[in-house]
Image: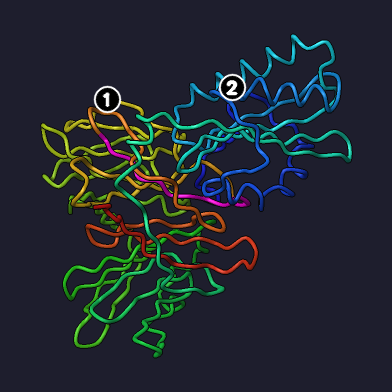
Amino acid sequence: MLARNHPNDFRGGTTPCGILAFVKAWHAALAALSLFSPQASTAADDLRSAARELARKTSAWSRGPVAAAYRNLSSLPDSEITAVRREFEAALAGSAEAATGAEVRITLSENASEFLLVEEIRKGDEAQVWMASWKRSQRTLASVSGITLDKKLVWEQDEPILDVAFAGDRMLVLAPSQITVHNGRAERAVLKWGPFAPGRPWSRDLRGRLRVNGDRVQAFLPWLVCNGSATPALVLQCAPSEAPWVLESGNHAILLANFAADRNYFDGRVVAQNGSSRSVAPFYSAVAVDEPGGTTWLLALVDGRAQLFDAAWVPVATLASWGSDLVGISAQCAAASLVLATRPGDANEPDALQAFSIVNRAAAPVSSPLTFSGPVTALWPSGATAAVAVARDLATGRYGAYVVTVVCSP
C-alpha cells in the first residue's frame, strides 16, 4: 500500500530496528498465508492456545527476554491481537527458561478455513518461523460463504498505473507521464502531461483518477484536471486546476472531495450529493453506505481509522482496522453495502482485498481475502459492480491492473 498505509503495523508491541532486516526474508512465505493451509503448522483449539504453543516453542528455542511486535492481518478485531500478546507474554513469563535477546514478530492471519498465528523470531544470525492454526467457527465460516472475489489482469507495465477505465471497447490507462488508450493490440499515447504541468513536481506516491460517464471522460491529478469526450475519438483538454475530485461508490452515490495536491490524500473538505458542504478529518478513500435513514459515508482516515459518519457528517462508529484504500461495490447476493478493503501493511509486503458487509454500523467479513503478489497501490470503483486494483509485483517491480468482481455462489 506504499505510504498510504498508516504506521500501526505493529500493534501492542515495540518495533526493534534489528527486526526489519530479517522480516524481509519471510515476505515470500507470508505472501501465501491467505491461501495456505500449513501442513507443518501446529493445530490449536483457539487463539489463546495457539499463542501459548508459540510461546512454548520460543522458550525451547532460546532463553532470556523477548522484544516482540504484533500485527493483525485478519478480519478479526484488534482486541484479538491484544489477547495474543497477553497470552504469549504470560506464557513466556511463566516459563522457567524464557528466550533471551530474541526479536519476535507475531502475525494474526487467516485463510478460508482457518485462522493462523505466525511467529518470526531472530536471535543474532539465526532465524526461525513457526505457525499455529485453529479452525473457524461455523458462524464465521457462514459469514464468508456465498461470496468470492475474482480478479482479472487487464494491463501490466513498468511505469506506475494510477487508474484504468473503460470507454466502450477501449481501455484507458492513467500513468504519471500520460494517458494511453488501448483497443485490441493498438496502443496510442493520448496525452502527455508536460505542456500542462504547473511547474511543480508531482507529489510522492502520486495518485490519479479516471472517470467515464457515458461518452464523457475526466482525469484528475494533483493541480491538473482533464475533460473530454470518448466518442467518436478520445479527445481531452487539460488545464491546471484545484477543483475537487469526483468520488463514486458502488451504488452511484457521489462525493466531491478536495485533494491535498502536495500530499496523497483528501484534505477533508467535501460536498455531498445534496449540495451540502462539510469539513471532516483528512482521508484517503471514501465509500457510500446504505442505511435506513439514507446514504452515509465511510472514510479511511489519514490517522488509520475507518470512520463511519451519519447523514449529518457526525462520526458514529469506528470500524475494522483496514488499509488506506476502500471501495464500494454492489452485488445481487449482498443485501447490505459491500466494502472492499486492503489490509494494513507497507510497500514491501504482499497485499489482499477482502469484502465486508456494513450492517448496524458494524463490519463483518463476507469473503475470503483475495491476495496479490505485492502491495496494492491504487483502488478505484469501475462502475457499480467492479473495482480496479493496481498492485506492484515484488518480484518484478512491474505494475499490474486488475478488474475485481464479486462472484455469488448458487
Residue type for callout 1: Val
Pick whichever, 9 or 72, lies toward us.
Answer: 72
Say what amino acid the circle numbered 2 marks.
Val
Contact? badges 1 and 2 (CB < 8 Å): no
Which quadrant holds residue 51?
Answer: top right
Q: As displayed, is residue 351 above or below residue 79? A: below
Residue 6's x, y, as percent? 52, 39
**In which quadrant of the rendered view does residue 122 lie?**
top right
Residue denoted by label 2: 84
Determine the CA span between mark 1 and mark 2: 28 Å
Does residue 228 belong to the magenta stretch?
A: no
Which residue appears at 71% of the width and 26% of the height? 68
Q: Is residue 348 magenta?
A: yes
Q: Can residue 15 be seen in this view?
A: yes
Find the magenta span and give its range: 347-358
Q: Residue at x 35, y 76 (%)?
A: 172
Choose top left, top right, bottom left or bottom right for residue 389: bottom left
Label 1 Cα crowd, 10 Å radius (few <14 / some 14-19 / many 20+): few
Q: Tell me the residue that label 1 is attached to.
A: 316
Q: In this view, does 349 lie above or below 221?
A: above
Residue 75 at x, y percent in the picture: 44, 35
- Return the disc, 1 or 2, that comes first in the chain's sequence: 2
Q: Is 208 placed left or right of 104 in the picture?
A: left
User: SS at mark 1?
Assistant: strand
